[in-house]
Each structure stands twice: as structure tokens, then as C-alpha cells.
Image: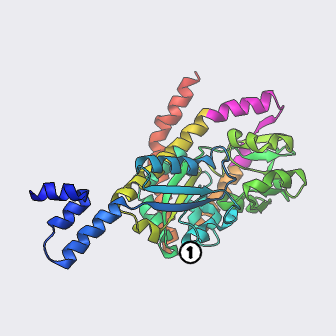
Amino acid sequence: MKRREFVTALGLGTAGAALVGCNQSTKDCDTAAGAGNKAQQKFHFKLVTSWPKNFPGLGMAPEHLAKTVKEMSKGRLEIKVYGAGELVPAFEVFDAVSNGTADMGHAGSYYWAGKTAASQFFTAVPFGLSAQEINSWIQYGGGQQLWEELYAPFNLIPRQGGNTGVQMAGWFNKEIKSLADIKGLKMRIPGLGGRVFEKAGGVPVTLPGGELYTSMQTGVIDATEWVGPYNDMAFGFHEVAKYYYYPGWHEPGAMLEFTINKDKYNSLPDDLKKILDIACLEANQNMLNEYTAKNNQALKSLVEEHNVQLRKLPDDVLKKLKDISEEVVKEQAQENELSQRIYKSVVDFRKQVRNYHLISELAYYQAREL
């Protein structure tokens, strides 16, 4: 029989052909066998999140990723998603992925300020980059390289994991007419925004999403920010707070993250790595599209059906918060040399894109309302 017909008859397929065709060097044959086996191997990842299981928007992003990866890999990479508390608590995602308890995580990087404070730059900077801008900074402004450098000591690889767009300023049970109304106010507000709120006289509290409704209802906190109308209505905040304030100065384009255990990522063949990378990018854009499509309808329902009082923060309050934000962000950059480089990269990129956006995005929005 001809060699190819002989291989086919044995049922060895492509991988077998590689083995039959390799020379007599054991090393060469082992290499061919390894490549063939890895190409057919199936991988199973556990992904833990900081959100309730199947929570709209935030919680569905990892579910969407898992579905996309399974389809693109034809079942060679399957990802099982665990909601907050199912495998690890909401605020232990970072450690769980770092130490290999889980293979992937989905959360907001500002939750890990206690691990590395500069992580906060990769969720949102008060009065910083919008969703469109932070996506561009990560991919084309050097952000991805800085992010990977920051997470390298923790055995983590970061990827973009969704964006909510400009958020709301939050839910309050009293009107905010001046900065004095913030004094002593206990508000759930994490990250750099929380530090700004503290300097403005408030009392920032960090709580996972699943505890916010009860905390507002029982008076543990006086106010809370979460995301925007689409998510906030799902949590029922309109039942425990009267006033809904905008704009979300603290999170102008809140980017979420997928973290991947570096060892597990490197165990994948190159094609599955690429599939996972592309799927993260797609999930990132998909979330932003979802919020853009659903926020306004939810806001309309909150105002017209639930009698929520929609309020804009006074300009003088926003101006003061902006001034404090500049101080806080600059202080944060002093942590170490890497933090300084990240800060400079963000500030320089914001300055660069701002000039064009004044005559493009902003000018167009204004013209559209004429």
C-alpha cells in the first residue's frame, strides 16, 4: 500500500500522519505527537465573578464570553461561570484567579486597590476617559502593556471585559444642593471616586452589589451608586431611594476586566489563546452596546412609572468634585514608578483625544439638539 493509504487505513488522521512521517529521532516524534494531541485536547476553565449569577449586563458578560468561546473553539475550550459567592466571595475574585483556585475572573479592577492601588486606573478615573476613550487607550495608547506589567507579579493576564458607558451619580434620600449636603453622608462608592467623596466630606463604603438594596433599606448607607438605569432598576433601588442624580463624574466610562491565570492561559494552544482574546474584546463591546440600547428605556420607566426624582448635580458641586479629583488622582500616582507611568499615560491620552472630541463628539451632540 502507498504510505498515505496505509495511514488512512489505520485511522490515524492528520496527527497520525505526522507521527508516521517524522524521522527516526525520538525527539522529533515526541514533538509531533505533542502538537497533535494538544490540538485535539479539551480544556475546562472555571470563571468566578463579583456579580450575582446571571445579573443583567454585568453578570451576563461572562456568560456571553463562555458561549462565544465554546462556539468558536467547537467545544475545545469550555468555561463554567460562577456567580459571586458560589465558589468564592465577590471581593476574592482577584486572589482566586491569582492562586489558581479559579482559572478566570470577571470584576472591576478598582476592587483590588488593596493589592495594587494603580489597578484603579483600569476601571475608571473621575472626570477621566469615556468608554470610547478608554477602549482606545487600552488598545492603541499603551494601556494594555501597562496593565499586563501591573498584574504580572500576581500571575494574572488582564483583558477588557465590558464597559457601562457614563454611569449615574447615584441614589440619594435627600437632595444635594451644595457640597455641604455631602458632609457625613455614608455612600457606597468604591475606587478613586470613593477617595474623592471622602475628601469632599462624605463617608465612602465598599459593598458588593448583592448587599446594596438591604443596606439602603436598613440605613446602613445613606446613598449608593451602582451603574445606570438598566442595572439599577433590576436591583430595585427606586424602592429604597427617592432621588436619582447624574452625571456619573466618578465613572465616566467604567471598564470591567477579565483576569486569566497566567499558567492556565499559557497551557492553551495558540489558536485557543487567540479565540479567548478575541472573545474578550467582543464581550467588551457587546456590553457597551447593551447598555446604550437599554439605559434610556429603563430611565423612562423609573421616572414615569415609579416617580423617581431625576436630578442633575449642581455645577458648583461638580466643579469642586473635579478639583478634588485632580488632587486625588495625582496623589495616587505617587505610589511607585509604575503608577506614575500609568498616570502619565492616562492624562496624556485624555489630553490628546479631548481636543478632537470637542470638535467631533461634543460639537455633533450640540448640533443635533439645535
Characterize the magenta stretch by its predominant secondary structure: helix
Mark 1: secondary structure: loop
Residue 313: tell me if it is visible. no
How many numbered callouts?
1
State the residue in front, 278 or 167.
278
Quarter of the image where one finds residue 189: bottom right
- Residue drawn at (77%, 61%) of the image: 204
Residue 166: tell me if it is visible. yes
Q: In which quarter of the image is the C terminus?
A: top right
What amino acid does circle 1 point to?
Asn
Left or right side of 162 for 137: left
Let me know if residue 295 is in the magenta part: yes
State the residue in front, 304 or 134.
304
- Residue drawn at (43%, 55%) of the image: 276
Q: Is residue 276 above or below residue 145?
A: above
State the residue in front, 245 or 282.
282
Q: Is residue 287 above or below residue 304?
A: below
* Residue of label 1: 99
Left or right side of 49 for 286: left
Query: Where residue 346 sits: x, y (%)?
Result: 49, 58
Which range is magenta? Answer: 294-318
State the residue in front, 326 or 185.
185
